[in-house]
Amino acid sequence: MSPFGSALGAGAEFDRIRGLARRWQQRAHDLGDDCALLEAGGQLLAVSLDVSVEDVHFRRAWLAPAEIGYRAAAAALSDLAAVAAEPMALLLTLGAPAGEPEATFDGLADGVADACADAGALIVGGDLSRAPVLLLDCCVIGRADAPVRRRGARPGDRLVVTGQLGGPRAALEAWRAGREPAAGARHRFARPGPRHEAARFLAQHRVRAMIDISDGLAADLGHLLAASDVGARLACDAIPVHPDAAAAAAALGEPAWRFAAGSGEEYELLAAVPESVSDAELAAAPVPIAAIGVIEAEPGIRASAGGVPVALPPGHDHFRG
Amino acid sequence: MSPFGSALGAGAEFDRIRGLARRWQQRAHDLGDDCALLEAGGQLLAVSLDVSVEDVHFRRAWLAPAEIGYRAAAAALSDLAAVAAEPMALLLTLGAPAGEPEATFDGLADGVADACADAGALIVGGDLSRAPVLLLDCCVIGRADAPVRRRGARPGDRLVVTGQLGGPRAALEAWRAGREPAAGARHRFARPGPRHEAARFLAQHRVRAMIDISDGLAADLGHLLAASDVGARLACDAIPVHPDAAAAAAALGEPAWRFAAGSGEEYELLAAVPESVSDAELAAAPVPIAAIGVIEAEPGIRASAGGVPVALPPGHDHFRG
């Protein structure tokens, strides 16, 4: 979920990542984006690792093996979308307890293969190990002819987001409460569609900075702003909310935008595009793209809802607990 | 340790890998070597994933965090040596229990950085997650101008191996018996030197097929022969044995060659070179290279020791238990 990097927001996980990066100094190269960029034969390649661990990123009671596989691969492939790279290849490390039934391996393999097919990537290798729980670590490699980074947003840019947010959180909250989630919310968690088409569209529309939403809109916006050394004004009422998330928020008595802004593992794209990119241009995108704010020179996020200043929810942190 | 692949020897782990490869069919591309080979901008790249899981590949009681990190990275980098690729970059997925002390992360980071420095690779990214045990999954990427595969050995070729075998097993047996291993054996386990220089030397000496010894000489020889669709005659007395392994074998009443041939996680290279590569040429190698047998057309391994036919020990299998 979280690449090693220096241009990160707050949180124990990010402190640890910063600690590693400091420790590595010259050996570590250009950390701090969704993908590492490598040059080979004059071609820029984007590479990312993304791990899914049982009982940290998913529970078996929630998902079938094919869904676990799809989700793990899609999450990794989403890092390629975030830098506007074209998926080429995936390698999979698969860990499972001794005695794990064959059907689990078959399901995981099918899910990973489906996600690769959807994104246009080939499975080229991997590793297999015994482990105390299921774990899937996906390495994805893509062609990055014109990579988009987290840095690059400029004052005046429009802040845009793809899709509708909050579905994965609505699914998680239902499972945690012992209920089966609404089908739409469950689908958003179990089978997130990586936004490669949307990334291509944004790349063709002069996108300046981009990140995928894995830690939650609020947290990932913080990463993008920190990397770009800017701030933002955020119109929370403009945040697109999944209908099942709106219903879940209403049941909790929480504003829908707040519920959605705190939802992680969305794998939607958050981007800064020049002011000149019009609503009409955005309306032609292959997936809905909503304008939710404006980049400003002053650091920090100035969020408002219903004309009133509001505070954003905190992000995901796998080390918190 | 074990890449996904079809050209593998026997064992439950390899059956599972074969099952995944069958399941993936067209989505999976050219599986079954130490590295996947990708073409980008006219440049061939070798890529490999290699995972180290606490209590499967190492125990904390045996190794300091810096050694765990070094070993995990060196094991992955060894896959690049096995295909004669030049190390470029490493990405690290690090999993650790909640509340893991900062010193563990520092040590792991130092070890990974040292192994990368020794091999000439940069750390370019990774992922961080909570996990029930320590886990390090290393993705390594290298330039493969003239990659060497497991397939390619031909009848008449000389079978050669780098270094001295058995050290890692001697260390493991000591730890398992509650003793501190001999220093040399411990060093071979804790800080395996990837054989990039030896790989370069072998590539310059017309090497036809190569593999690194992670599952044990006997098992990895089986993989190389299966991939090349050949067999071999193996002179077990010629297998180079580490002095600490010879001592450990003597204490167990086991032939030294047998002890060494069953030792996994060696990260030495096993290769087939043309008959025309002389002993004098091999003697000029940057590390000792021993000739231990001859490739034959007939499938299977015909091993002898002291002029008598012998059976080889089985290999490592992480799923066995």
Image (cartoon, coloured by chain):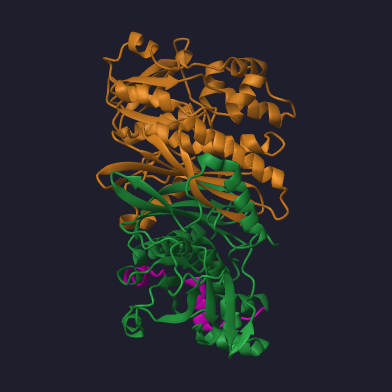
Chain colours: A orange, B green
Residue located at (47% from left, 67% from top): B212
How many numbered discs, if any? 0
Res B284 → quadrant: bottom left
Query: Against A156, is A209 above or below?
Result: below
Q: What is the x, y in percent for residue A8?
A: 40, 39
Q: What is the x, y in percent for residue B135?
A: 56, 55
Query: Against B311, is B95 above or below?
Result: above
Q: Residue furthest left?
A: A42
Point out the stretch of residues depicted in magenta.
B178-201
Query: Against A106, is B252 above or below?
Result: below
Q: What is the x, y in percent for residue A279?
A: 35, 10
Which quadrant, please, contains the C terminus of chain A? top right
Query: Against A239, is A89 above or below?
Result: below
Residue located at (51% from left, 44% from top): B28
**Residue B179 is inside the magenta segment:** yes
Is residue A299 at least partly visible in the picture?
Answer: no
Front residue (pair A202, B94): A202
Q: What is the x, y in percent for residue A252?
A: 65, 19
Res A284 → quadrant: top left
Front residue (pair A244, A107): A107
- Left or right: residue B8 compared with residue A200: right
Residue located at (28% from left, 31% from top): A152
- Left or right: residue A289 compared with residue B145: right
Front residue (pair B143, B102): B143
Q: Residue furthest right?
A: A178
Is residue B52 at least partly visible in the picture?
Answer: yes
**Residue B95 is inside the magenta segment:** no
